[in-house]
Image (cartoon, rainbow, N blue to C red):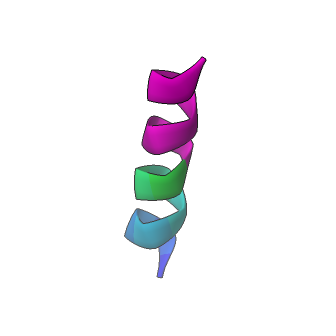
Amino acid sequence: MKWIYQCMEMSVTELY
């Protein structure tokens, strides 16, 4: 389930 966390982090980075 690590890829899910990475995907979320990527989305957060896109927002910022």
Residue 5 placement (x, y as % from top left): 54, 63
Quick check: is 8 in the magenta stretch?
no
Q: Quadrant of residue 9?
A: top right
Q: Is residue 13 above or below residue 3?
A: above
Out of 7 and 15, give the one closest to the viewer: 15
Residue 8 placement (x, y as % from top left): 51, 54
Residue 13 placement (x, y as % from top left): 53, 26
Q: Is residue 9 above or below residue 3?
A: above
Q: Residue extending furthest top? A: 16
Q: Residue extending furthest front? A: 15
Out of 11 and 2, give the one closest to the viewer: 11
Out of 9 and 15, give the one closest to the viewer: 15
Quick check: is 11 in the magenta stretch?
yes
Q: Residue at x 53, y 26 (%)?
A: 15
Q: Is residue 7 above or below residue 16?
A: below
Q: Main secondary structure of the magenta part?
A: helix
Residue numbers of the magenta segment = 9-16
Q: Is residue 5 above or below residue 9?
A: below
Q: Residue at x 47, y 82 (%)?
A: 1
Q: Residue at x 60, y 17 (%)?
A: 16
